[in-house]
Image: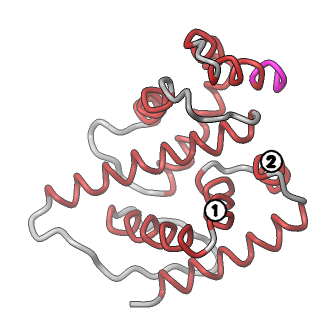
Amino acid sequence: MSVEITHLLQRHHQGDRHAFDRMVPLVYDQLRAIAHRQLQRNGPRGPLLDTTSLVQEAYLRLVDEHDVDWRDRGHFFAICARAMRRIMVDDARRRLAAKRGGGWVEVSMTADAMASEGQPEHLLAIDEALTKLADFNPRLAQLVECRYFAGMTEEETAEALQASLRTVQRDWMRARAWLLKMLETP
């Protein structure tokens, strides 16, 4: 099935919109799992943001993306996780804007888990730290998107990033330490 997904992604990149639509049923369950993990980590959602709506929003953002040179299934899931993260960040910003006196709050993160406290402020702090990490080292930011947001295994991340397993393991420790330091700094 992985080969079929890669083939459909390549056809989509070449302009065949129907290829993307044929691929979605093949990856839908995995997309729902990614969306569910992201929503679980990031606490309460707005009234319109649930697993299904997050997958649908990601689909709408990606269906017309013909400029993306999809390498394979892993690369596709990494891009989907990034799109879902952006959707959730936009939702968190909307919720904060709606709150009276909304704004940034200090957020700390334990080394044991990079789990959210269920507040939009926390998700925005993670997003800001990840954006800074991307400025510092884009590959580490991509790795965090694959491991943390997409829930990929080390092996799947290595495949998606076209890196060795040992590089992914070493970079994952480095990225986590960098993000923890950024999130603990007031």
- CA–CA distance in space, label 2 to label 1: 13 Å
In the image, residue 61 sits, relative to residue 104, either above or below, namely above
On the image, the x and y values in percent for residue 117 come to: 42, 68
In the rendered structure, the answer to whether residue 84 lies left or right of residue 186 reads: right
Location of residue 18 with respect to 50 vertically, above or below: above
Residue drawn at point x = 17 percent, y = 68 percent: 102
Residue 105 is inside the magenta segment: no
Question: Whole-percent x and y of residue 108?
Answer: 45, 82
Q: Nearer the viewer, residue 79 or 176?
A: 79
- Image disc number at residue 156: 2
- The answer to which quarter of the image holds residue 138 is bottom right
Is residue 2 a member of the stretch shown in magenta? yes
Q: Secondary structure at mark 1?
A: helix
> Depth check: 165 or 92 in front?
165
**Residue occupied by mark 1:** 144
What's the colour scheme?
A: secondary structure
Dividing the image into 4 quarters, which one contains the C terminus?
Answer: bottom left
Q: Farthest residue toward the bottom?
A: 186
Q: Mark 1: few, some, or many residues within 10 Å (few <14, many ≥20)?
A: many
Q: Residue at x 48, y 81 (%)?
A: 183
Image: 91 above or below 109: above
Quadrant location of the N terminus in the rendered image:
top right
Q: Earlier in the sequence, mark 2 or mark 1?
A: 1
Quadrant of residue 32 in the image? top right
Q: Which mark is residue 75?
A: none
The picture quadrant where one finds residue 66 is top right
Q: Dot 2 surroundings within 10 Å: few (below 14), some, or many (20 or more)? A: many
Tell me the magenta residue range: 1-5
Vertical order, 78 against 184 (above or below): above
Magenta highlight: main SS: helix
What's the residue type where badge 2 is placed? Answer: Glu
Three-letter amino acid code at the position of disc 1: Val
